[in-house]
Amino acid sequence: MTVERINEDATVTSRYQLLQRAADTVAARGKNYGTPASNFERIAVLWTGILGVEVSSTDVALMMVALKLARLCEDDGHLDSWIDIAGYAACGFEVVNDREG
């Protein structure tokens, strides 16, 4: 498996390009997994059953960001983790915004 490195990807050289890649990734995932609200709720139900503690869809977004942060502690040049953090943050925002809206 080839790991995409920050300094090796000429298509992502600014924060704006990273955010665009995150937006593109979120859109593509939505076609496969449904809306963030429905997907994160499904994950929350599964994690609640596994962990034996209540997990919300917002918790899912936060924990996915935390997972990516943990990976960046090992390798801060892994582009995919930076892109995924932006994507999970946007999805978490959407989940909260839809609930509050």
Image (cartoon, helix red, strand yellow):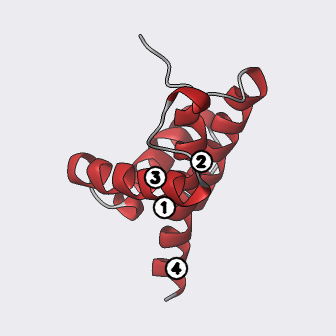
Give the quadrant of the N terminus.
top left
The first of marks 4 and 3 along the sequence is 3
> In the image, residue 92 lies at what x, y percent?
55, 62
Does 80 sit left or right of 41 as displayed? Answer: right
Residue located beneath label 2 in the image:
85
Q: Could you say which is closer to the camera, residue 73 or residue 77? A: 77
**Distance (Cα) linking label 3 and label 1:** 10 Å
Residue located beneath label 3 in the image:
22
The first of marks 3 and 2 along the sequence is 3
Residue located beneath label 4 in the image:
97
Q: Could you say which is closer to the camera, residue 16 or residue 89? A: 16
Give above or below for 53 relative to 58. Answer: above
> In the image, residue 46 lies at what x, y percent?
46, 40
| Of marks 3 and 2, the one in the foreground | 3
Quick check: marks 2 and 1 in contact, CB under 8 Å?
no
Give above or below for 101 relative to 35. Answer: below
> In the image, residue 93 lies at what x, y percent?
55, 69
